[in-house]
Amino acid sequence: MIAKKNRPYLFIAFLFALGAVMPVLLRQYHLNMLTEIIVFALYAVSYNLLLGYAGLLSFGHAMFFGMGAFTVAVSLIHIPGLSLWGAIGLAIAMTTVVGFVTGGLLLRHKGAYFALLTLAFNSLFCAVATKWHTVTGGDDGLSVTRPDLSLGFTTINMAGLTSFYYFTLVIIGAAIVFCWYFTQTAMGQTVLMMRENEERMKFLGYNTNISRLILFTFTGAVAGLAGAFYTLHFQFCSQSAISVDMTTTVLLMTFVGGTGTFWGPMMGALVYVVLQNYLSDITDRWPLFMGLIFVFMVLFIPGGLTQIIQYVRNLFSGRNGTDKSLAVKEGSS
Amino acid sequence: MSDFPVFFLHGLAYGGLLFLVSAGLTLVFGMMNVLNFAHAAMYMLGAYFSYTILRMTGQFWLSLMICPLLLFVIGAVIERFLLRRVHVFGHVHELLLTFGLAYIITEVVKWVWGNFPLAVNVGGFLGGTVEIFGITYPLYRIFIFASAALVGIMMALILYRTRLGIILRAAVNDSEMVNALGFNVPLVFMGVFAFGAALSGFAGVIAGPLLSTYPGMANEILIDAFVVIVVGGFGSLGGAVVASLIIGELQSFGVLLFPKLSLALVYLLMSVVLIIKPSGLFGEKQ
Amino acid sequence: MKKIFGLAVLSVLLLALAVPAVAEDTIKIAAMEPLSGSFKDIGERYLDGVVYAAKVINENGGLLGKKVEVIPVDSELKPDVATRKAQNLILRDNVKFFCGGTGSSVGAAMEQLAERQNAIMISYGMAAASMTGEKCSKNFFRTCGNTDQQSYALAALVAKKGYKRVAIIAQDYSFGQEALAAFKRRLAKLNPSAEIVAELYHPAGTKDFAPYVSQLIAAKPDAIFTPNWGNDLTLLLKQGRPMGMKQVVLSYYINDEFTIQAMGDDSLMIGNMGAEVYTLSIPTDKNKEFVAKFYKDKGYYPTWLRGKSFMSTMFWAEAVKKAGTTDIPAVIKAWEGLTYDGPAGLWTMRACDHQAQVPFWYTEIVKENPFFKHAFEASAGMVPAEDVSVPCAETGCKMKK
Amino acid sequence: MLEVKDIHSFYGKSHILQGVSMALKEGELVCLLGRNGVGKSTTLKSIMGLVKPSEGSIRFNEQELIGKRPYEVARLGVGYVPEDRRIFRSLTVHENLLMGIRNGAKKGGWTIERVYEQFPQLKQRRENKGGHLSGGEQQMLTVARTLMGDPKLILVDEPTEGLAPLIVKEVLEMLAAVRSSGVTVLMVEQNFKASIKVADRFYIMGKGHMVFDGDTEALLAAEEIRRNYLEV
């Protein structure tokens, strides 16, 4: 048996290996979908750091996703000769700054107030993106072409799907691992404990406001990275990347996957993208299904897919009874 | 500025409608700390019920009475059987629940009534016009403001002149304590939520003839109503009154004075208020 | 254990993606329309016309010996959604032809995608002039009029009626701005003495039009021109009329039966005028025959949207027939300069910008009409194609061939 | 009058009460002592129905309280004076007192007039907003508000926390007076030196369960218990 401590690393390694062989196994169409899943997985992971770890329900995460998406699109169009790295770097820098500034304003509130404010701010950003036609393309959006990837010793053409898929796998994969690592660090643990007992943390001398601001900025930058790849993937960016819908999308993914674990939201992203691709082909009433899934899950499986999997696993391993902890998890808020 | 009075009237009418929509929202938010995403969907439901009643009877006043009652019942059922169940899980789950409900209600409406705008005409006395400030002005717009004023005064009387009002205001401060003092807070909450729903239905009936009734009407008003809450102060009824009127006038005069900025003005106002007074104009510090 | 279980689930889900699709021997054309959301009724009517055209083609022996298959795609009126789905269709089903009528933003994004993926995008309703102007592409064809042409047609109507004071109002985004600019340009040329007494822009989806209406009335115009559509047109009239806005309204899409119904009051609409590429009351024999056949088949009329997408699809089929192949470069080449003599007159696909040169049909809304119980259009009059044409040199299109 | 038997309560995942038992006789003033975080407040909340024990029983005048909601418990005659006072900040003092009257309470007993008589300070400030009162006044107001409901038993959570020594004395005297008027009092305290002057009997809690039960003399004698379970 492998030491418990090393299991996550093994898991990560396996995921990368699995990802690496996918272009051989999958047809182009599915590879395309998988790329989208990976991008959204990072977006969902970043959101879960806020919701699942710090207990902050934000309705404004698309601000950062969209900001990253637009930064890449606008900079690629207006800065001739900008490299892929440069565009991505700009997106991260931009979202870090925006995260820090908005975080300073918004984090003065908690709970439902925070949710409401983030929603209002998201609407503001979306309105600006729609109105500022000369830069953002307004309703028409912006089309971009992926530049080639320069690695110093060689240049890789990014026009094809497979090469872009590998690029996504490596960069986004690394970002996800970094997020996971973040939760294991002292900083991450601080945030975790903060959710459980903020008063006690304050008592012990932690500045919870600063911790929260750092986390908010960090998740913003990560979402910005996801947004950057969203533009690169579709080679297109429009105001829907920054719309409130994009926030509800990530909320749904995170919630369906389960906020209780780090890996749950990734599963949520996968299910969401697959469902969206098939359901919206089958029925034009898919918002209804989305609503039903939401209500059903809130009422009966608040722990998301993770909870179901845990339940099934418990059945197999012969442990009886459901895990009490999930049912009362949010009880104290 | 000879147009001043007319544009002021325009602002009052739209501000009044905004208040009607946000009053229930802010009440529920203030009392129960639930940000009800389904509020605008219920407002839409009110408009559609009204459409059907008008088609069947042609009686606008009748639908103005029946629709809020229907929404009251729907609100009570939602609170009793859905919202209360997730209350123990905290506000995240409450928000998500109302969020899902908003989707469901919107889709059901599209299913039942179709996807295109429906015409609602008040007709009769209210459909007429009056001469005011030397121009012809639709009476209905004045009626909107009058109903908003009436609702506002009624709510203020309940809150500040009755024992129920004391209980409600106490519940805003600390609902658990009200419960521990021997009041059936769950019942109070159910009543508040249902009343909020009824108000949204009332607003829907009023809005139908002005804005026409269509599935997108919910989302369009929701963000405006949220901005009213942010600007006015979380859960403050007086704040909602002031913020609704400010936003109504801002949009009206904004169109006249800064046509290029009209959409952004509202958000600009919100940002300024947030920076200067984060808890809103009339909000208590959290 | 937990991780391994998760892995198993993940792997199964991933492998489930790899189910192979069955290839069919049809010519596929994907119709990108909003089939959910607020503009569903528009998308569905456009789609209806495309499907009907495919039926007509298939009943007459198909295209190049194959059946035409229409794939409805819900664009949700979002360019990102539309391109994502289109991309999937290209990768999965090898679809090469796309068409659509709703949302210039969707059209612009599809134009780029078509160029990148060597496909063809056909617009029978997306009207932004720039798509065949500075943004033009060899992979993009527009069979309907564009904002320039449509504004020119309405300016011609205003000049003909002799209105001197004209107020204009539009949605504040590229479509509205382009439409107003073209209208002003043309009117100044056709009738230099006409005066624009008010020019207003409002956000798309405005709820309260009162402040705008007051300004329109204050300007005391003879007529009001607006390219507004959907609820923005309904509310402008519905809120404006009771406030004393009595003037004739000239609009792009006045002949939309849904808009007229949504008013709920015919008197708001009677007297208003519009101009379109296709409208039900075109008094030609070809059109009467088409309307009669369609009505017999479906039990309802091929109102403007259905007619436009029908003719557009027929036009495309002509091009494919002429090319003799579905090979994209060949179809592009065959279509350039091709003409189609359909129910709405003679259409010519111009090679320089892929903008069809089409006549326009103007109508006035009247109470009595042979089609509906509610008010609808009177018999249409024609504005010849030459009168609304923008010369190649003025479009701004530099097509890379 | 009140009999708590072997109750277990959870707060999230943590097992806070691990078999707490205690009993109160009518007319007693009992003080529950113990260090921070051992579960004193949770015990009161469990009685009040604000926290739901998973096992055990709580009987008040022969009625089972577990499973009852807070307002039902209150209607049986249990008053709750919470930690950090929790007056209604935006209501006036007078309105706060009105909130204490519950429907169905028997007439007589505590009336507004009697409360103002007992607490003249509150009368002076009757039109002031609750949020504008001083700490001591707020504490008075919470107790007075609870008395308005004519409780047979009141649960008082750390009434002296954060108050100046002079006010502490005043508050404790007030509670003694309440007891003298015939109301049974269960008070949670950390400040054992102050409470020793007013309480008839003491319970001391260790982590999640009782470790001591006895009167003042017994407590003074049990030096080891005091050293181990009370603050140094």
Image (cartoon, rainbow, N blue to C red):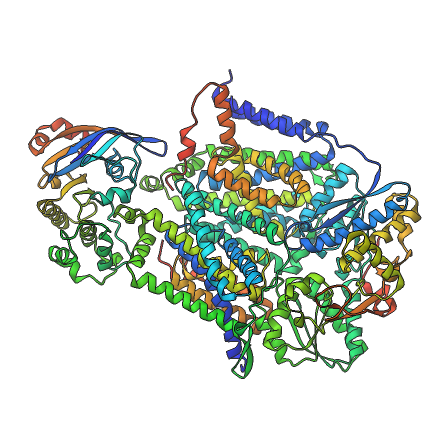
- Residue at the far top in the pictured view: A1
Coordinates of residue C5 in the picture (x, y in percent)? 55, 23
Which residue lies most toward the bottom here? B134
On screen, residue C5 versus residue B239, left or right, reads right
Q: Residue furthest front?
A: B57
- x and y percent of residue A197 in the render? 35, 39
Q: Residue at x 62, y 26 (%)?
A: C11
Query: Can the viewer see residue A107?
Result: no
Q: Is residue B217 above or below residue C153?
A: above
Count of marks placed on residues: 0
| Up/down of C366 relative to B168, above or below | below
- Tell me which residue sits at (66%, 56%) in the image: A139
Residue at left 72%, top 27%?
A: A24
Q: Is residue B235 left or right of residue D190?
A: right
Q: Position of residue C205 (x, y in %)?
A: 61, 62
D10 above or below A216? above
Q: Evaluate whether residue D184 shows in this view.
A: yes
- D65 left or right, relative to C130: left
Where residue C7 appears, as percent x and y from the top left, is: 58, 25
Q: Image quarter for residue C136?
A: bottom right
Task: Please name whichever residue, B215 or D51, is drawn nearer the observer in this view of the structure.
Answer: B215
Q: Nearer the viewer, residue D146 or C281?
A: C281
Quarter of the rendering containing residue C101: bottom right
Give above or below for B220 relative to C96: below
